[in-house]
Image: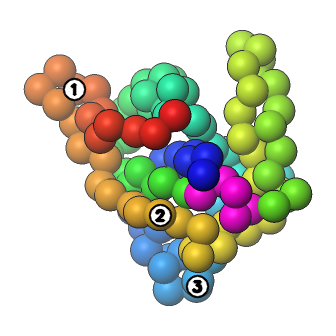
Amino acid sequence: MATIYKICPTASWRKAEIDGEFCGSGIDYSDGYIHFSTGAQVAETAARHYATMDDLVLIAVDADRLGDALKWEPARSGGLFPHLYEPLPLVAVLWATPLTRGKDGRHCFPVLEE
């Protein structure tokens, strides 16, 4: 099983729990796909795109359950990132947890599968 990760505002995640699927938030809507990161990429993603944001959720997703709608595409940095071209079905979600901050102000991550 390959695990990928999504960071999103808590309010967006709560809506997804009610709706039964996650359709994205913010940049996902404008880009036309849901952005994910691998375990090795997610801390940098948080620092780059969410550094000033609080009230976030970290979501772990079983990438194998997403089928052909999941594409691995190069970012500007050259690394491959997972992008989902349809709503995320909640049956693919392994867990979701609040993303807290450490004393240094950076977001704290659990040990993640890469």
Q: Residue at x 43, y 28 (%)?
A: 43
Q: Residue at x 39, y 61 (%)?
A: 96
| Residue ranking furthest to the left | 103
- Categorize mark 1 by other alpha carbons within 10 Å: few (<14), some (14-19), many (20+): few
Looking at the image, is mark 3 or mark 1 earlier in the sequence? 3
Distance in Å between CA atoms under marks 1 and 2: 27 Å
Looking at the image, is mark 1 or mark 2 earlier in the sequence? 2
**Residues in magenta, as a range:** 62-66
Q: 54 or 73: nearer the eye?
A: 73
What residue is disc 1 on? 105
Please identify the dominant SS of the magenta region. Answer: helix
Q: Which mark is residue 10?
A: none
What residue is disc 2 on? 94
Q: Which percent across, then down, holds residue 94?
A: 47, 63
What residue is disc 3 on? 19
Q: Which percent across, then down, holds residue 106?
A: 28, 26
Looking at the image, is mark 3 or mark 2 earlier in the sequence? 3
